Amino acid sequence: MSYVGETLSNLLHQTAFFNLTWGNYVMILVAFVFLFLAIKKGFEPLLLVPIAFGMLLVNIYPDIIASPEETSNGVGGLLYYFYSLDEWSILPSLIFMGVGAMTDFGPLIANPISFLLGAAAQFGIFGAYFLAILLGFNDKAAAAVSIIGGADGPTSIFLAGKLGQTGLMGPIAVAAYSYMALVPIIQPPIMKLFTSKKERAIKMENLRPVSKLEKILFPIVVTSVVCVILPTTAPLVGMLMLGNLFRESGVVRQLSETASNAMMYIVVILLGTSVGATTSAEAFLNITTLKIVFLGLVAFMFGTAAGTLFGKLLCKVTGGKINPLIGSAGVSAVPMAARVSQKVGAEEDPTNFLLMHAMGPNVAGVIGTAVAAGVFMAIFGI
């Protein structure tokens, strides 16, 4: 009987109930909230579902992301190996390839002024960088945190790894992806604050047709120019443009379909669950994480405001030909930010169609955030 009792006791004490802390319960609750937002509200479910489930798993069974040194048999947890692909910058670069294969750069090519709107939206990144230093982060940590302002999860993970800030990578990635998912909630009040009803109702002229040759040359020219000036951007910009070249060349349909579908979704699963698994209670519930979440929100709000205000300036310069709302899409949450521009514009005039106009700054923002990351790496000699 003693053997049976001891066996039952061992089994009972192996359950999570005897090992969970109050912090684990808090993070499990956060995971449920994320799942609710993703499934019920439809906020970026492709991102939030795997992130939330990874968060749930690690707070029930922490060893799922344990390194080989932390285990008795020398074999790391499943999500440890997924996460290693994040640290090595493999998954963020593959995500960029998939985004490039899925995205039509035509609106950006047709309206090159979109580059300026995408650049203006990066103000939030550099503003948050100096604020992070004031809050006590060192220069590299401040740079890694501030890139959240671009609302670009892969770039945030990429830069944190390159700058050696792997300890902050989890909170940074979760904050970045959370704000990407919450774009429809965060952006509209800021857009309305800085624009008038008349400006929001402006109808823009149809974009000119873009030739096939222009679409083929664009990724080649951008890669050549940007990567010559900032070679450190090659893993991101290069993969983004390679994916787009797959799409536009018309001769590698199988590669384009694989990059934009099967490969993209596999990478999202690996990246999302591994990022979520970095949010154990011990690693996430601390003052540093709260600062990162706060700074990320400030950066994102500043970026949205800067893009909108620059759009307002261009509206004045062009005599009312540009709707300032498209400037808010300069943050690189593709295509959610462009859809928000369309939605806010349609609230003033249901016949106003801004989506394709907003896609120009939106795509420019993807490139701009990658360039901002390259600037930081160049500054620190990475």
Image (cartoon, helix red, strand yellow):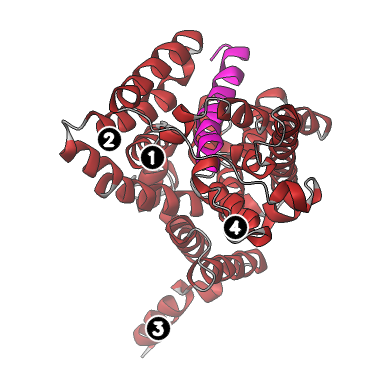
- Do the numbered discs 1 and 2 sit on residues whose CB atoms are within 8 Å? yes
Q: Position of residue 377 (x, y in %)?
A: 57, 18
Cα separation, mark 2 vs mark 3, equals 59 Å
The chief SS type of the magenta part is: helix
List the residue tagged with mark 2: 247
Q: Which mark is residue 103?
A: 1
Crowding near pointer 2: few (<14 within 10 Å), some, many (20+)? Answer: many
CA–CA distance between discs 1 and 2? 8 Å
Looking at the rendering, which quadrant does residue 26 occupy?
bottom right
Residue name at image x 32 percent, y 46 percent: 264
Q: Which residues are magenta?
A: 358-382
- Residue 34 position, x and y percent, is 56, 65
Q: In what element is the residue under mark 2?
A: helix
Residue 106: image quadrant is top left
Q: Is residue 352 left or right of residue 304?
A: left
- The amino acid sitting under disc 4 is Lys
- Horizontally, residue 146 falls left or right of residue 6, namely right
The type of residue carrying mark 1 is Thr
Query: Does label 1 or label 3 sit earlier along the sequence?
Result: 3
**Secondary structure state at the residue bearing disc 3:** helix
